[in-house]
Image (cartoon, rainbow, N blue to C red):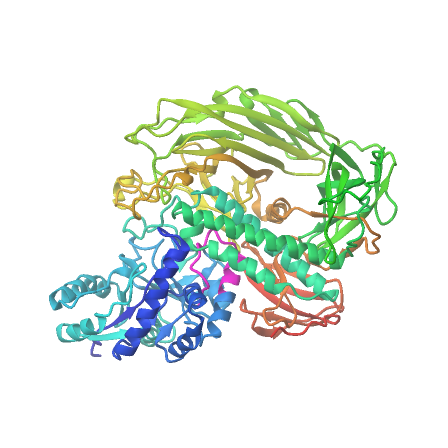
């Protein structure tokens, strides 16, 4: 058969970072001008066939916010296939965004794009620094069977071609086109000179021809914030004369269609399995320090995702079933703020200080929406009396997870003392202050007493909000308590009555505590000399430690890459004498505080080849807590950072002899074998020793195991040289967006030199993490690990009421077995029913049952885009049997017999 001539598809596009080395509005002002010039170019040059606007709808919507009158023009260009938009709302970082955030990102992108003529049906992820294992499954869930990416892969043996089957851990498979080593910006001509056009084309053609698996090659005509190349049609004419092949001004969908046609029905292609985090050798750079740059952003991101997924969306469903108006529009606005912050240059912490200040405002806006929506939903579920302003009469504990929980919960109880007059009201006579409560009891729905302990008590201000009057402010006698909240039902609540002036009963024995130890029925913690923590699992006899050792080293890198100085100097907290204090002592919980004043170099030396000889104190305080029924140890560490150019990590010496870790990533726990490399073989960027996680990382040697949980702390390292040493990054402090001559990135700069003093993260920072000891038989302990991750990162929520309440216990749904994760309970996108998403994140098949606590009219298995697939059986009116293959993400649409909500317009 005669060999086909090659066809070169030249695709015009722009990669438009929403914010990066300029803040958002400066880039948007540029964007408006660029799109205006693009429209003129379409009108003036009929040969300019099409343009791709970066695979993200945010650029389109940002433009239309300034030029709303252009919406019909944009729609016409899209329908004529002149302009390609979507499918994403924004090009997010895949590892730092949660699984549900990915889905909301695509849902929002499709919805906005469909209103403007339809989205590009391609999983286009051109500039993300690395890629998660479950991306193929997510793309197929939106009926996208092809992906296109650049970074995190390539240059190794077996990675030479341009097409692959990319396979998720569950077996989902998409066709992948892998970009050339210069990415999406190699083919921008911007010249009328034929010789330069030919020279640029020939340089790239050699690589494209060598990598091609079909007769079709993709030539990217664009770059970061590039205006459309108005010389490209002339270049096409020049190249048609020069090239022994077909040259087209094309687009991504046409290229993919041509490749598929050439490949045939079931092509034999190399396989790419799971996540991609390498590509260091040949400049497919992953910038391995982005998981710890500006850690405060990662923490806020995790907090806001948790509020949206575990609180607002489920509460909205429960309130709607009680007849409340849907709060989905407000929730979607909060999601939009969070997803905007998940742009890869934003959440990675690799932009200017102005950009990241604006991110904080967006996170705060999302939290403000969350405060209102949760208040309104709880007001429907647990009726709120805006005229009640005296004593708290009821205390409720809401469980945001799909399994029942019994644990120690912090709460506040207020007793009324006196009205507070607001404003100039001299004629108002305030009643005398009431006497303090002599005591109180908590009684459950059956009249049984609930154990609690008062941590502290103070006079403070209370407030009752009203929709029909000004808020009422009062002086209150405020009790901060910790209570034993037992058998809190899943996705529901349990309440208790507050009985004033009653002496509470004696607390049963639970936690035994002293100045240097804590012990409950499962675990014993001892504080050894110099403050290190040693842990014994009383069930197995296994011991762990020293734990919670702080290690500080130099960092002369930048926002993209950690880089050590040539002559580094390391400091450990065990070099400094700590102050140890017993902070909390009750049968329900004990807390010990360990405080260090670590004398650390104030900065890097001027030449950045070593650390400064001048030192100052950095104050580090950790509160170590153990609750009565807990099988984990919780740590809350506050660091007052007063130094620069350093990396501060907490280190756990686990005693587990393994170089394998299991890290939670979006919708999958991935197995990683850690190794070190001969860095002389890497002339662009050294392989990063750190790795990303979502909520936890697990170690095991077959006999002994341990899981480290963390809230918004996504970077860890498992040491190769010191077996069992696990480090969690707390702070990585640098002062520039992109440096030069980094030891760990010898290939050059990752961006422009820009001073970023706020990336030094000065001031106070608080970090929460936890340690769970367990056996090394992971198949048997995964259920417990997954439940503990939910318990730690999704704590119960308390609600106080001053008026009478009738429903003291309620549950909406539950999942059996409890280790099958429910990741979403939300109103359907079309308003027609309730969406419940279930994830099996480990490599074991699971038979499960989703149980609704009211009759189910109909249930359907759906794609991730909520398109109905097959009908599901309902057993006994309210139970839906499910079978999940390993690593499967399953979406169920449920219509309840009592669900009277109508589809949203």
Q: Quadrant of the N terminus?
A: bottom left
Image quadrant in which you'd find residue 869: bottom right
Comparing 725 with 42, the one in front is 42
Comparing 242 with 700, the one in front is 242
Main secondary structure type of the part rendered in magenta: loop
Magenta residue check for 280: no
- Residue 45: x percent and y percent? 25, 77
Q: Would residue 348 be visible to someone looking at this image?
A: no
| Residue drawn at (58%, 27%) of the image | 534
Q: Is residue 629 above or below residue 327?
A: above
Magenta residue check for 100: yes
Image quadrant in which you'd find residue 747: top left
Q: Is residue 93 above or below residue 433?
A: below
Q: How many marks?
A: 0
Q: Quadrant of the C terminus?
A: bottom right
Name the residue furthest front: 427
Q: Would residue 865 be visible to someone looking at this image?
A: yes
- Residue 666: x percent and y percent? 51, 54
Residue 69 relative to residue 769: left or right: left
Start-end of magenta stretch: 87-106
Comparing 740 with 218, the one in front is 740
- Residue 777: x percent and y percent? 57, 43
Comparing 357 with 143, the one in front is 357
Name the residue furthest left: 195
- Residue 157: x percent and y percent? 29, 54
Residue 98 relative to residue 224: left or right: right
């Amino acid at each position: 058969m005669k060999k086909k001539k090659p066809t070169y598809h030249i695709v015009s596009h722009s990669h438009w970072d929403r914010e990066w080395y300029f803040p958002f509005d400066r880039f948007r002002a540029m964007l408006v001008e660029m799109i205006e010039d693009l429209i003129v170019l379409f009108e003036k040059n009929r040969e300019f066939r099409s343009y791709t606007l970066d695979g993200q709808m945010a650029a389109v919507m940002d433009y239309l916010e300034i030029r709303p009158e252009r919406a019909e023009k944009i729609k016409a260009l899209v329908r004529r296939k002149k302009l390609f938009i979507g499918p994403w709302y924004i090009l997010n970082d895949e590892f730092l965004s949660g699984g549900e955030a990915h889905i909301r990102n695509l849902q929002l992108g499709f919805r906005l794009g469909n209103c403007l003529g339809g989205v590009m049906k391609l999983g286009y992820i051109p500039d993300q620094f690395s890629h998660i294992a479950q991306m193929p499954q997510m793309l197929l869930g939106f009926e996208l069977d092809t992906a296109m990416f650049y970074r995190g892969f390539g240059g190794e043996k077996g990675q030479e071609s341009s097409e692959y089957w990319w396979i998720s851990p569950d077996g989902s498979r998409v066709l992948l086109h892998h970009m050339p080593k210069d990415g999406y910006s190699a083919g921008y001509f911007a010249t009328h000179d034929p010789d330069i056009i030919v020279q640029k084309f020939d340089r790239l053609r050699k690589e494209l021809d060598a990598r091609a698996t079909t007769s079709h090659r993709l030539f990217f005509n664009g770059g970061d914030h590039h205006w459309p190349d108005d010389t490209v049609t002339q270049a096409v004419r020049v190249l048609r004369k020069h090239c022994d092949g077909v040259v087209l001004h094309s687009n991504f969908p046409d290229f993919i269609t041509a490749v598929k046609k050439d490949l045939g029905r079931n092509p034999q292609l190399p396989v790419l399995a799971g996540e991609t985090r390498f590509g260091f050798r040949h400049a497919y750079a992953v910038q391995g320090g982005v998981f710890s740059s500006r850690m405060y952003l990662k923490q806020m991101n995790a907090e806001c995702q948790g509020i949206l997924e575990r609180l607002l969306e489920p509460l909205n469903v429960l309130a709607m079933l009680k007849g409340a108006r849907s709060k989905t529009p407000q929730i979607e606005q909060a999601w939009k703020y969070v997803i905007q912050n998940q742009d890869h240059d934003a959440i990675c912490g690799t932009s200017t200080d102005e950009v990241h200040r604006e991110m904080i405002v967006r996170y705060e806006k999302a939290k403000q929406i969350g405060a209102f929506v949760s208040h309104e939903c709880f007001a429907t579920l647990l009726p709120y009396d805006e005229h009640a302003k005296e004593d708290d009469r009821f205390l409720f504990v809401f469980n945001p997870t799909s399994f029942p929980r019994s644990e120690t919960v912090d709460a506040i109880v207020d007793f009324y003392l006196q009205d507070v007059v607001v404003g100039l009201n001299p004629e108002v006579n305030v009643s005398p202050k009431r006497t303090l409560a002599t005591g109180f009891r908590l009684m459950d729905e059956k009249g049984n007493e609930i154990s609690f302990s008062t941590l502290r008590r103070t006079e403070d201000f209370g407030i009752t909000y009203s929709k029909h009057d000004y808020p009422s402010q009062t002086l209150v006698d405020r009790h901060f308590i910790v209570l034993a909240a037992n058998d809190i039902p899943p996705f529901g609540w349990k309440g208790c009555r507050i009985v004033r002036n009653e002496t509470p009963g004696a607390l049963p024995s639970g936690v035994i505590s002293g100045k240097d130890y804590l012990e409950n029925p499962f675990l014993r913690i001892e504080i050894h000399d110099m403050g290190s923590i040693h842990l014994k699992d009383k069930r197995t006899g296994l011991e762990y430690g020293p734990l919670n050792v702080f290690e500080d080293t130099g960092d002369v890198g930048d926002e993209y890459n950690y880089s050590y100085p040539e002559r580094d100097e390391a400091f450990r907290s065990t070099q400094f004498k700590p102050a140890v204090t017993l902070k909390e002592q009750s049968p329900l919980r004990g807390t010990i505080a360990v405080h260090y004043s670590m004398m650390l170099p104030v900065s890097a030396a001027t030449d950045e080849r070593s650390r400064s000889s001048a030192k100052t104190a950095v104050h580090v305080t950790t509160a170590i807590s153990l609750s009565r029924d807990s099988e984990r140890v919780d740590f809350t560490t506050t660091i007052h950072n007063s130094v620069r150019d350093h990396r501060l990590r907490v280190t756990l010496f686990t005693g587990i002899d393994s170089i394998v870790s299991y890290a939670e990533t979006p919708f999958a726990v991935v197995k990683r074998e850690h190794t070190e490399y001969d860095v002389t073989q890497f002339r662009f960027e050294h392989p990063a020793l750190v790795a990303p996680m979502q909520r936890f990382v697990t170690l095991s040697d077959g006999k002994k195991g341990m899981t480290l949980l963390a809230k918004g702390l996504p970077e860890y390292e498992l040491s190769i040289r010191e077996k069992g040493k696990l480090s969690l990054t707390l702070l990585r402090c640098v002062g520039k967006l992109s440096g030069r001559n980094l030891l760990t990135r010898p290939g050059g700069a990752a961006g422009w030199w820009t001073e970023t003093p706020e990336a030094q993260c000065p001031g106070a920072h608080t970090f929460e993490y936890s340690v769970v000891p367990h056996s090394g038989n992971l198949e048997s302990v995964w259920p417990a690990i997954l439940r503990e991750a939910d318990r730690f990162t999704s704590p119960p929520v308390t609600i106080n009421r001053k008026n009478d309440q009738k429903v003291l216990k309620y549950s909406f749904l539950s999942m059996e077995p409890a280790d099958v994760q429910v990741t979403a309970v939300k109103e359907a996108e079309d308003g027609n029913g309730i969406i419940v998403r279930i994830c099996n994140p480990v490599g074991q098949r699971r038979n499960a049952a989703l149980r609704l606590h009211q009759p189910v009219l109909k249930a359907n298995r759906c794609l991730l885009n909520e398109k109905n697939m097959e009908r599901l059986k309902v057993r006994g009116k309210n139970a839906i049997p499910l079978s999940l293959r390993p690593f499967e993400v399953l979406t169920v649409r449920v219509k309840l017999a009592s669900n009277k909500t109508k589809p949203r317009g």
